[in-house]
Image: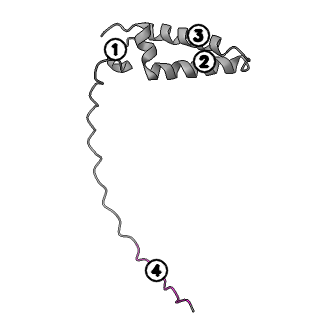
């Protein structure tokens, strides 16, 4: 696990998206007060960076530097069920245009 700096986190598009969404909800809670969007962004940024600093985050999970972990292998597929014999279809005959 490596330590991530504020600048590294702020360059991550996922972190930026989290901040933007939080800023929107803060703005919504205040009735979308005009001229306060920068204040809301800074508040959201501080909240998200504090949250990320407290959570166990690795550079792989935030997309900074290292490769992402390998995907888990797929579970075995359920056994196939035999198809029931379908009833014969009724044939329709199209009439030629006159």
- Going from the N terminus, do you reach mark 4 or mark 3 first? 3
Q: Which residue is mark 3?
A: 42
Q: Main secondary structure of the magenta part?
A: loop
> Percent x, y for residue 94?
51, 85
Question: Between tags 3 and 1, which lies in front?
Answer: 3
Q: Are marks 2 and 1 in contact (CB under 8 Å)?
A: no
Q: Which residue is mark 2?
A: 23
Q: Are marks 2 and 3 in contact (CB under 8 Å)?
A: no
C-alpha separation, residue under disc 2 versus residue under disc 3 = 8 Å
C-alpha separation, residue under disc 4 versus residue under disc 3 = 68 Å
Kindly identify the residue that appears in the image at 64 percent across and 17 percent down. 26
- Going from the N terminus, do you reach mark 2 or mark 1 first? 2
> Percent x, y for residue 33?
73, 17
C-alpha separation, residue under disc 3 versus residue under disc 1 = 24 Å
C-alpha separation, residue under disc 4 versus residue under disc 1 = 62 Å
Q: Are marks 4 and 1 in contact (CB under 8 Å)?
A: no
Image: magenta residue range: 87-97
Tag 2: Cα neighbours inside 10 Å, few (<14), some, or many (≥20)?
Answer: many
C-alpha separation, residue under disc 2 versus residue under disc 1 = 24 Å
Q: Quadrant of residue 59?
A: top left
- Going from the N terminus, do you reach mark 4 or mark 2 first? 2
Magenta span includes 75: no
Magenta span includes 93: yes
Q: Relative to the observer, which residue lies in front, 70 or 34?
A: 34
Q: Which residue is mark 1?
A: 58
- Going from the N terminus, do you reach mark 3 or mark 1 first? 3
> Percent x, y for residue 10?
46, 14
Q: Which residue is mark 4?
A: 90
Tag 1: Cα neighbours inside 10 Å, few (<14), some, or many (≥20)?
Answer: some
- Identify the element where label 3 is drawn: helix
Kindly identify the residue that appears in the image at 30 percent across and 47 percent down. 78
């Amino acid at each position: 696990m490596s330590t991530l700096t504020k600048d590294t986190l702020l360059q991550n598009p996922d972190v930026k998206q989290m901040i933007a969404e939080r800023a929107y909800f803060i703005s919504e809670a205040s009735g979308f007060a005009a001229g306060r969007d920068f204040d809301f962004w800074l508040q959201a940024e501080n909240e998200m960076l504090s949250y990320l600093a407290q959570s166990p985050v690795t550079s792989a999970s935030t997309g900074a530097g290292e490769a992402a972990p390998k995907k888990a292998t797929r579970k075995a597929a359920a056994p196939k069920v035999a198809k029931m014999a379908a009833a014969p279809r009724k044939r329709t005959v199209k009439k030629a245009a006159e």
